[in-house]
Amino acid sequence: MPSSAVALRSDKPLTPAMVSAIWELASALDAARIPSEVDNSVWLEVPSRLLRGEDGRSDNVWLRECLTRLTGVQLSGEWRGDPWGAVLLAEWKITQGGSMVRALIPPA
């Protein structure tokens, strides 16, 4: 699907940290060889240090804020003339003492 057919909508602006986290989640999807079209949501496990960035706080305070905001980001577009919509991130959990993030990525 061409990127021009997809729009990101959010009631809050995307911060550089949010954009970075989106790229890291996309990279994790690629690394896991998840196809672009799946029937069900996918749980990803990503080290929190990757989502925080090099200068991110190790206590994950800002990462939690970033992930919370990402659950409010919506995707929308059109496929063969039919409109569709989805959220970018359905659910997240910080596990293993703060070292891992489990993120539920919706199928769209």
Image (tube, rainbow, N blue to C red):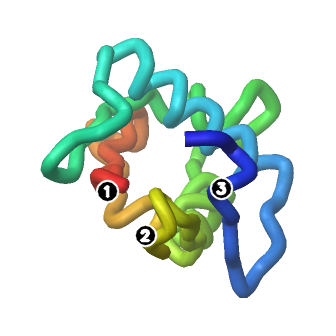
Percent position of residue 47, x then y: 44, 27
Figure check: 7 above or below 55: below
Percent position of residue 28, x then y: 44, 24
Q: Which residue is mark 3?
A: 5
Marks 2 and 3: which is nearer the front?
Answer: 3
Q: CA distance from mark 2 to mark 3?
A: 14 Å
Identify the residue shown where x is 31% and y is 17%.
Answer: 32
Q: Which mark is residue 86?
A: 2
Marks 1 and 3: which is nearer the front?
Answer: 3
Figure check: 73 above or below 1: below
Q: Quadrant of the N terminus?
A: top right
User: Sequence order check: which comes first, mark 2 or mark 3?
Assistant: 3
Q: Secondary structure at mark 3?
A: helix
Q: Which residue is mark 1?
A: 106
Badge 2, how many Cα within 10 Å: few under 14, some, many 20+?
some
Q: Nearest the camera: 65 or 42?
A: 42
- Kindly identify the amino acid type of the residue bearing the numbered disc 1: Pro
